[in-house]
Amino acid sequence: MTFEETTEFLYKQLPVFQHKGASAYKPGLQNTIELDQYFNHPHKSYKTIHIGGTNGKGSTSHSLAAILQKAGYKVGLYTSPHLVDFRERIRVNGEMISKKYVIDFVENNFNNIEYIHPSFFELSMMMAFCYFREMNVDIAIIEVGLGGRLDSTNIISPLLSIITNISIDHTQFLGDTKEQIAKEKAGIIKSDIPVLIGESGSLTVKQIFTDKAKLEKTKIYFAEQLYSDLKQVDSLNDSYYSCSRYDQIESDLDGSYHIHNLKTILSATDILRNQGLIISDLNVIDALKEVKTSTGLRGRWEKLSDSPLTYCDTGHNVGGITYISQKLNQIECNSLRIIIGMVNDKDISNILSLLPTKAIYYFTQAQIPRALPAEELKEKATSYNLKGNVYKNVVDAYNAAVNDSSQDDFIFIGGSNFTVGDLLKYLE
């Protein structure tokens, strides 16, 4: 098989949540356990870090990978979903898994794949675990796919478990309150493995994490307490972060929400030092300047063009859109133009209520079955006084926005990973 044929098999023959939504979701670990036994428990060959939460998983995962790489470790990184290329999900020291490995993995294990019939996520995760073993990584950072308690990744025994924050998302699987979602996310808290909470949120959510850590007899840390003095400093020519330990931290990740991610990243680094990893402060400072280039992270308040100024962001739930809207409302421009497409299995009312009414909207849809039809999105948006036109795909919406813009306008693309992914594929 060619690489294209192999990925086509993965997408069409195995249930893919990224494309299909709820019909592809397989809660429980039975398939994963069978695969793990078949491949002789590859994740036991190296140390791991487990990262869950609603928002900030990607930025936290990639930043920690950059720091550990800078400290001299060989680092595996497993994240989801991908934006352009399937191989984005599986990296070692920033380099994507080879096409040959993907092809060989599927061809050599085809009969077992057919027998177990795992989900797309279960198989891609096991591919990552096996690849990391073959590449002799020192440590692998494993991002939770969905939830925590029943997520396929929850078979690992990491050095550290991280829960970045809790927001409302995937309510059909995890519950429709933050407390219910927190209980699912808390499922990655394990006996004698320290856990770090990025943003604890309400007292009730914090208590859920505290109680689970007590039940598992493990140490719990809160990043908000460990780096309570971290602040963002804006100067005439630059912006950086400062606290008592680090006078100046520059980051190539932007967005008003990044300070919360950074508290989690710095706290995690300190805990990993306590676990025996050797990481200098200079490693941290140097790594955070180049997270995108050293790990391949895309779609986090990413600049796409200077004229007109154009950014994209993959934030797609209430927590993510809250921070994005704050950023958009602060931007000074002639006209704010927002290209937006969303998926059809979310309650988007709360999200639409957060978006700026001053913008001109380009309602569109990504090229996946889960996409919410652009006409339906516009209809719902109208009730929140969001006005604009409908475009049949992301590329048409983007080209229209560019053609409509003057040099002093600002264009934003977002609403889902898939909207951003469609645009990045076009631009590349």
Image (cartoon, rainbow, N blue to C red):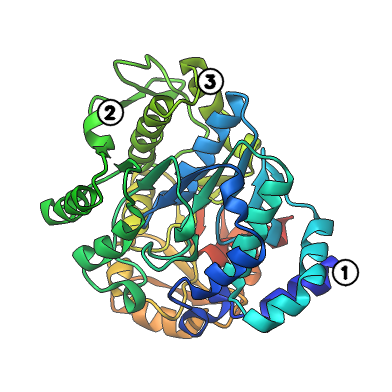
Report the Cα–Cα distance between label 2 and label 3.
18 Å
In the foreground, 281 or 59: 281
Q: Which residue is mark 3?
A: 283
Which label sits on residue 2? 1
In the foreground, 297 or 136: 136
Q: Are marks 3 and 1 in contact (CB under 8 Å)?
A: no
Q: Which residue is mark 2?
A: 227
Q: Secondary structure at mark 3?
A: helix
Determine crowd level at label 2: few under 14, some 14-19, many 20+ residues with C-alpha closer than 10 A. Answer: some
| 336 to 181, vertically: above or below | above
In the foreground, 209 or 9: 209
Which numbered disc flags the more N-terminal residue, 3 or 1? Answer: 1
Q: Secondary structure at mark 1?
A: loop
In the foreground, 38 or 238: 38
Which numbered disc flags the more N-terminal residue, 2 or 3? Answer: 2
Q: How many labels sit on residues?
A: 3
The answer to whether residue 334 is visible is no
| 355 to 71, vertically: above or below | below
Query: Residue 156: x percent and y percent?
Result: 48, 53
Taking the view exactly as shown, the residue that stands out farthest to the right is 1
